[in-house]
Image: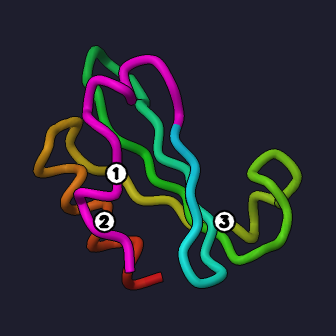
């Protein structure tokens, strides 16, 4: 189970993506910007392969506000995958 406290501080995502795994689920969380709006983009997949080597059709994506509440939403979403 992914918990908010398992995810890094919001400031980390300003510069770097974060990858993790939980019970066979792999995930990546990163900042996305469009139209001067920042979002957290979480991508999940079930594969032994890394993000770059997993086909896009095998990935599921979720967008949340770039905030601590957004990280809570990301953790909750990851637990439904």
Q: Secondary structure at mark 2?
A: helix
The residue segment tinted magenta is: 1-17
> Which residue is denoted by mark 2 in the rendering?
75
Q: Residue at x 41, y 72 (%)?
A: 78
Q: Secondary structure at mark 1?
A: loop
Residue 16 % position (x, y): 51, 25
Q: Are marks 3 and 2 in contact (CB under 8 Å)?
A: no
Q: Residue at x 85, y 62 (%)?
A: 49
Q: CA distance from mark 2 to mark 1?
A: 8 Å
Residue 57 % position (x, y): 75, 67
Quarter containing the N terminus:
bottom left
Q: Which mark is residue 59?
A: 3
Q: How is the image coloured?
A: rainbow
> Which residue is denoted by mark 1 in the rendering?
7
Picture quarter containing residue 68? Answer: top left
Residue 19 % position (x, y): 58, 49
Mark 3 or mark 1, which is nearer the start of the sequence?
A: 1
Decide which of 77, 19 is in the foreground and name it: 19
Q: Residues within 10 Å of mark 1 (few under 14, many from 20)?
A: some
Mark 1 or mark 2, which is nearer the start of the sequence?
A: 1
Q: Nearer the viewer, mark 2 or mark 1?
A: 1
Q: CA distance from mark 3 to mark 2?
A: 16 Å
Q: Secondary structure at mark 3?
A: strand
Residue 32 % position (x, y): 43, 30
Q: Are marks 2 and 1 in contact (CB under 8 Å)?
A: yes
């Amino acid at each position: 189970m992914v918990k908010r406290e398992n995810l890094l501080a919001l400031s980390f995502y300003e510069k770097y993506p974060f990858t993790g795994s939980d019970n066979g689920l792999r995930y990546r969380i990163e900042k996305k910007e469009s139209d001067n709006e920042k979002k957290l983009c979480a991508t999940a997949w079930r594969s032994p392969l890394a993000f770059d080597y997993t086909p896009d059709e095998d990935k599921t994506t979720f967008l949340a506000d770039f905030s601590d509440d957004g990280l809570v939403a990301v953790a909750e979403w990851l637990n439904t995958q």
